[in-house]
Image (cartoon, rainbow, N blue to C red):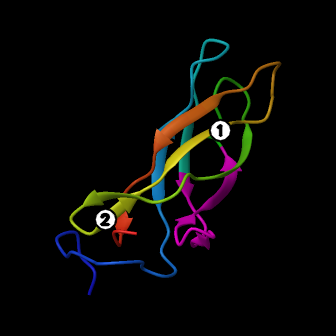
Amino acid sequence: MVGKNVFIQGFVPNHNHRSVYYTSVDAGHVHQCLDVTSPPVMSKDDNHVHYTEGFVVYEDGHTHYYQAYSGPAFPVGNGMHVHYYDFNTTEANRHRHRLKSVGQPAPGNK
């Protein structure tokens, strides 16, 4: 059983990450991004990344689309790891937003 206080050595297959982010302030507003990633995509260096895509929350009369891959897994202790995200949304109403954050932890220290 996987719980928040259980240390998990190594890689946990088929996990994903959930996240709640805010975009950069552009054109006088922000958007919230509620996200759940794909399962892991293995990399050649025995690490993994996650793919994500979707729309930011409707705000100021419009929305933006995004498609991105996370950075590699970064262990944070207690058998958990996180991923960094840094990407831009599509343009709408003559502007775009940047999203730069860390996703929620998931089980496994790799």
Direction top: furthest residue: 28
Question: Badge 1 is on which residue?
Answer: 87
Q: Nearer the viewer, residue 5 or 83?
A: 83
**Residue type pointed to by label 1:** Phe
13 vs 39, left or right, is: left
What are the residue bounds of the magenta stretch? 35-55
Q: Nearer the viewer, residue 9 or 66?
A: 9
Residue at (47, 58) in percent of width and height: 18
Mark 2 = which residue? Answer: 80
Residue 49 magenta: yes
Residue 107 is covered by the magenta coloring: no
- Mark 1 nearby-residue class (10 Å; few <14, some 14–19, many ≥20): some
Q: Seen in the image, is 64 located left or right of residue 26?
A: right
Residue 58 position (above or below residue 68): above
Residue at 72 percent across and 45 percent down: it is: 66
Quadrant of the frame with the N terminus: bottom left
The reply, left or right, for residue 2 in relation to residue 54 is left
